[in-house]
Amino acid sequence: MTPPGGALPTPMRGQVWYVEVPEQDDNKRYLVVSNNHRNQSAMDSVLAIPIGGSPNLPDIAEIVKLSQSDPMGGSARCNLVASIPKARFRSQIAALTPQTMERVAAGLRAAMNL
């Protein structure tokens, strides 16, 4: 399932991408959370979490609302970590601020009780 052009994309930590979700016949926004050593390796997947736009999400540590400094709105769902094949990454949208990524790291720690 290699994208057109043959080469797999290299999503990097902190980047938001449109990812193909075949079960939903749609592309969804995902934030890459795995470390860049893994992302640049021969592994065929990266760890990512969905970015949702629902305003009705609960106010818990595992859900990180994006700030006005970020290039988009929504919430990072740190409780929904997934291993996603690189071949499903379609296009990079933007990168989140370092401050938001620090909050996402805290959300991941909360979700995993680390």
Image: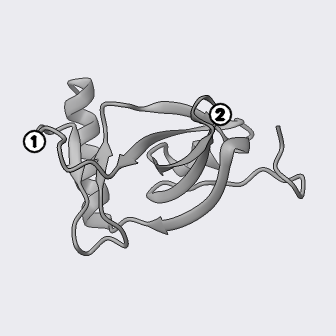
Query: Residue 25 shows which numbered tag?
Result: none
Residue 56 in sight in this render: yes
Instruction: Determine which quarter of the picture holds residue 10.
Output: bottom right
10 Å neighbourhood of mark 2: few (<14), some, or many (≥20)? few
Q: Secondary structure at mark 2?
A: helix
Image depth: mark 1 or mark 2 in front:
2
Crowding at dot 1, Cα within 10 Å, few <14 / some 14-19 / many 20+, comes out as few
Q: Up-down: is 74 above or below 46?
A: below
Q: Quadrant of the C terminus?
A: top left
Q: 81 or 98: which is nearer to us? A: 81
Q: Secondary structure at mark 1?
A: loop
Residue toward you, 105 or 60: 60
User: Does 75 sit left or right of 8 as displayed?
Assistant: left
Residue 41 pos. (x, y %):
69, 43
- In the image, residue 49 lies at what x, y percent? 42, 41
Quadrant where the N terminus sits is top right
The residue pinned by badge 1 equals 59
The answer for how far apart the CA atoms under marks 1 and 2 are is 30 Å
**Up/down of 101 relative to 56, above or below:** below
Q: Residue furthest right?
A: 6
